[in-house]
Image: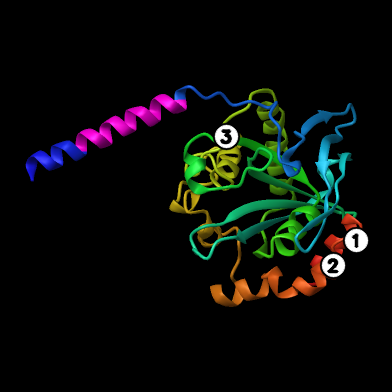
Amino acid sequence: MKKFLVLISGVLLLAAFGISGYLLTKTPLNDREWDPLFSKLNTITTKEDGGIVIHNLRNFSYGSSTIVSREWNDTTINPDDIEQVYFFLDHFSPIRQVGHTFVSFHLKDGSTMAFSIEARREAAETYSFINGFLNEYELQYLWGTERDLVTQRTVYKNEQLYRFPLALSREQAQAMFKGFVAETNNLAAQPRFYHTLTANCTNMLAKIVNKHYPGTLPYDISWNLTGLSDYYLEKQGFIVLGSASPEELRTRYDLTAHRSELIENASLPSKDFSLLLADF
């Protein structure tokens, strides 16, 4: 038995060295043949009047299992107009601990834009947890319309999506936006790899916030088990339960319950679509 354990330990050690050596040979790049959903990088320009131009804002339209239209637009906003932030949790797996997260920023005129940290996939490449450990995907900071990111998941992919209002002041919402904007150009200039545990959709959101506002979000296991991130935000006071139980809150903010309406209105102008969400 002792010899067997020594043999197994040796095999595992060699495998670890082999994987480490393999990963060191790989270099993150921006110039690959990308899946259409990730074909363009966002960059940011700041105007003299303080306006922020988001280049290549994604604004796709979706039907059930089809991409109906593909648009990438340049959009200018005034950060001072941001009034509210929403947190989205997408349960794309039957495993409760697994999920994708992103946020959206709402402006006083009713317009919105969303920010999602993605595993940037090449054409014909699919996402897997294992590949996410092996530097198979680049990291992407994706800006898109709220309509795009919501209907992609609820209409096109038929996944369960929750939308929670965050308990942030206007000043905090604007500060969060500015932090994400600051990092967008950095990643476009210096590509990095996505990693399932250490550089994913949730912990990179938290790391960016903490980089610009240290200590705001203490580490939690939900940084790695991203499907638990709503519970984490409740514990931190950013999602307010009030008199509702956690289960009642999730029922209230479950967009999947409105899927038929989302399908019917998936091609609305972006602002009108966000106003529709506000009525749910």
Amino acid carrying label 2: it is Leu
Question: Circle 1 sits in a helix, a strand or a loop, which is it?
Answer: loop
Amino acid carrying label 1: it is Leu
Q: Earlier in the sequence, mark 3 or mark 1?
A: 3
Q: Is residue 10 magenta?
A: yes
Q: Is residue 266 above or below residue 223?
A: below
Q: Earlier in the sequence, mark 2 or mark 1?
A: 1
Indicate the position of residue 5 as horizontal and vertical percent values: 14, 42
Q: Which mark is residue 268?
A: 1
Would you name the residue on which mark 2 appears? 276
Amino acid carrying label 3: it is Lys
Question: Circle 3 sits in a helix, a strand or a loop, which is it?
Answer: helix
Q: Nearer the viewer, mark 3 or mark 2?
A: 2
The residue located at (51%, 42%) in the rendering is 132
Q: Are marks 2 and 1 in contact (CB under 8 Å)?
A: yes
Neighbour class for label 1 at 10 Å: few (<14), some, many (≥20)? some
Indicate the position of residue 275 as horizontal and vertical percent values: 86, 64
- What is the C-alpha distance between the residues marked 3 and 2? 34 Å
Q: Quick one: 215 or 140, which is closer to the camera? A: 140
- What is the C-alpha distance between the residues marked 2 and 1? 9 Å
Q: Nearer the viewer, mark 3 or mark 1?
A: 1
Q: Quick one: 113 or 30, which is closer to the camera? A: 30
Question: Circle 2 sits in a helix, a strand or a loop, which is it?
Answer: helix
Would you name the residue on which mark 3 appears? 211
The answer to whether one can see residue 135 in this image is yes
The answer to whether one can see residue 232 in this image is no
The C terminus, quarter of image: bottom right
> From which residue to which does the magenta span run?
9-23
Indicate the position of residue 7 as horizontal and vertical percent values: 17, 37
